[in-house]
Amino acid sequence: MSKLIQRLAEARKQGNVGLLAEAIPYARWMQIAPENGTGELLTRMRYHEELIGNTFLPAIHGGTLGAMLEMTAIFHLLWETDTPTVPKIVNITVDYLRSARPRDVIAAAKVTKQGRRMVNVFAEAWQDDRSRPVASASAHFLVQSEDEPSAL
Amino acid sequence: MAKPPLASPDERLALFQKLFSDAIPHNKALGIKVVAVAKGLASMQLDWREELVGNPETGVLAGGPITAMLDGCCGMAVATMLTKPEPFATLDLRIDYAKPAEPGKPVIAEAECYRMTRSVAFTRAFAHQGDPKNPIAAAAGTFMLGTKGKVTRPVMAKEFLK
C-alpha cells in the first residue's frame, strides 16, 4: 500500500485533510495543500514570490495554476471518493480565464463522470471572488490499473 | 548579399535563457535551462530534484513541474515568431501524460509554434528524457496575442533574420 493511502487513513482518523500534502514533496515545495475548514474540500496554493511568471503585471505563472488544479483534482478524488489506489493522471486541459494576481489561489473540484476504471474531474481556481475564476481544468484519471505506478 | 544574423547561436541562447528563465521567477525556481532556440522552435531542460517529486517512494517527478515547463516552452516558441512587440498569454494548455518520468534523469521539452494568426498562436510540444520518439508527455497550447500589459521583451523574430 502506498504511503499516500496510509496517510489518507491517518488524515481521515484525525479529520485533517491537510496531512495529505505533507506526504508529497512537490506539494510542500509549492505550498499547495487541501483544507476542509468550511465543510467543503478546497485546495489552497499559498502565494510566494517563486510562483510569479510575469514580473511586470505581476501575475502568477500559468504552469503553477495547471499544477495546482491537478493537485486539487487528486486531493478531491482521494478525500471524496472511495479510491483504493492513488489516482493516475492521464491528461488535463487547462483554460486560462484571467491573469492571477500575487495572492493565494483557491480551488475546488467535482467528479463529472465516475467510471469503473476512468474518472473525469472538473476543477476551478479563483482568488478573491469565486464568481471570477482565474483558471479551470478538466482531467482524466485512471483509478484502477495494472499499468505503471502513479506519479504520486 | 544577405545580412548576417543579429547574434551568434551562443549569444542568442544566452539571451533566451535570460528572458525566459532567469527573468521569470517560477522558471528560475524550477531551474529551467534554455537548451535550443530557432524561429518557431524552443527547447528547455528540467533537472530532477527531490523537491519536485510527486511520489517519494518511487522518486517520480510530479506532473506540475512538467506542466510548467511545457507551458513556458510553448510560450517561448511563440515569442520567436513575433514580428512586432506585443504581449501574449496562454489561452489553454492540454497535457497528455504518456508515462511517468524516470527518476534522477533530466526532462527535455521541445515545442513548436506551427501557426500564427493575428489573434492566436498555436503550439505543440513533447517532453522526453533523451529519446524524442519515446515521450513522457505531449502538450498542445494556444496563446492569445495582443493581450493587455506591457511589452517586456524585444521583437524576438529579429534574432533569426538571415
Image (cartoon, rainbow, N blue to C red):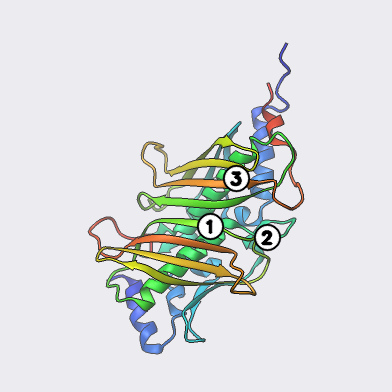
Q: Position of residue A7 (x, y in %)?
A: 37, 78
- SS assignment at label 2: strand
Task: Write the residue at 68% across / 60% down.
Answer: A59
Q: Position of residue B32 (x, y in %)?
A: 57, 49
List the residue tagged with mark 3.
B75
Location of residue B25 (image quadrant): bottom right
Residue type of the residue flagged with mark 2: Ala
Compared to residue A109, the image places residue B29 above or below, namely above
Viewer-closest of B60 and B135: B135
Q: CA distance from mark 3 to mark 1?
A: 15 Å
- SS assignment at label 3: helix
Q: Position of residue B68 (x, y in %)?
A: 54, 54
Location of residue B126 (image quadrant): top left
Q: Position of residue A21 (x, y in %)?
A: 46, 73
Of all residues, the one furthest to the top in this rendering is B1
Q: How many marks?
A: 3
Side of B154 relative to A64 (left or right)? right
Residue type of the residue flagged with mark 1: Asp
Side of B154 relative to A48 (left or right)? right
Q: Are marks 3 and 1 on the same chain?
A: no
The mark closer to the camera, 1 or 2, is 1
Q: Is residue B50 visible?
A: no
Which is more N-terminal, label 2 or label 1?
Answer: 2
Circle 2 residues within 10 Å: few <14, some 14–19, many ≥20: some
- SS assignment at label 1: strand
List the residue tagged with mark 2.
A59
Q: CA distance from mark 1 to mark 2?
A: 16 Å
- Residues tagged 1 and 2 counted as in contact (Cβ below 8 A): no
Compared to residue A44, the image places residue B67 above or below, namely above
Residue type of the residue flagged with mark 3: Gly
Say the numbered circle drawn on residue A95. 1
